[in-house]
Image (tube, helix red, strand yellow):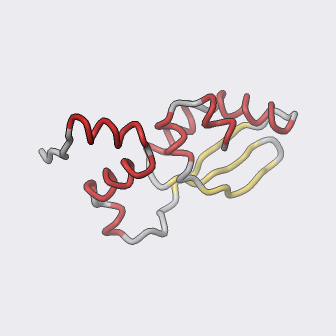
Amino acid sequence: MQALQEKAPKFLVLQMERVLLKALDKQILIVAVDNEFGSRMVDEYGSLFSDLLKELTGNRIRIKSVIEQSSRPKTQQNDPYQAFMEAQKQDPILRQIVEKFGAELQYN
């Protein structure tokens, strides 16, 4: 995870903290994500993951995602306010921006 934090955008690191390792099948690492957005992120940054895994293991390993429902309670999954508060706790830059400029969620 440290290599990812050094070479990847912060939003990608936060997304990858949510994945679960499922299996390693030959040269394919299978990870579980909890939504379509997470799956797209894994697909879009697959070459970055492969490069990092090659640096760490010496082997070229592809990454593939499968979508699985999260074990978190449904109310926590769908609460955008809670997700925003959690993002502020995990990201000091976001927290500083919110503290300096203020922010609130808009519902359309």
Residue in view at x 31 percent, y 69 percent: 75
Residue in view at x 32 percent, y 54 percent: 85
Q: In which quarter of the image is residue 97?
A: top left
Residue in view at x 68 percent, y 50 percent: 30
Q: Which of the two residues, 83 or 95, is positioned nearer the viewer here?
A: 95
Residue in view at x 20 percent, y 41 percent: 103
Q: Quadrant of residue 102?
A: top left
Q: Where is residue 29 in the image (x, y as percent from the top left)?
A: 72, 46
Residue 98 left/right relative to 88: left
Q: Taking 81 as reference, is 94 above or below it?
A: above
Quarter of the image with the N terminus in it: top right
Q: Which of the two residues, 64 or 77, is positioned nearer the viewer here?
A: 77
Q: Name the residue furthest left.
A: 108
Quarter of the image with the C terminus in it: top left
Q: Position of residue 5 (x, y in %)?
A: 60, 37
Q: Taking 52 as reference, is 63 above or below it?
A: below
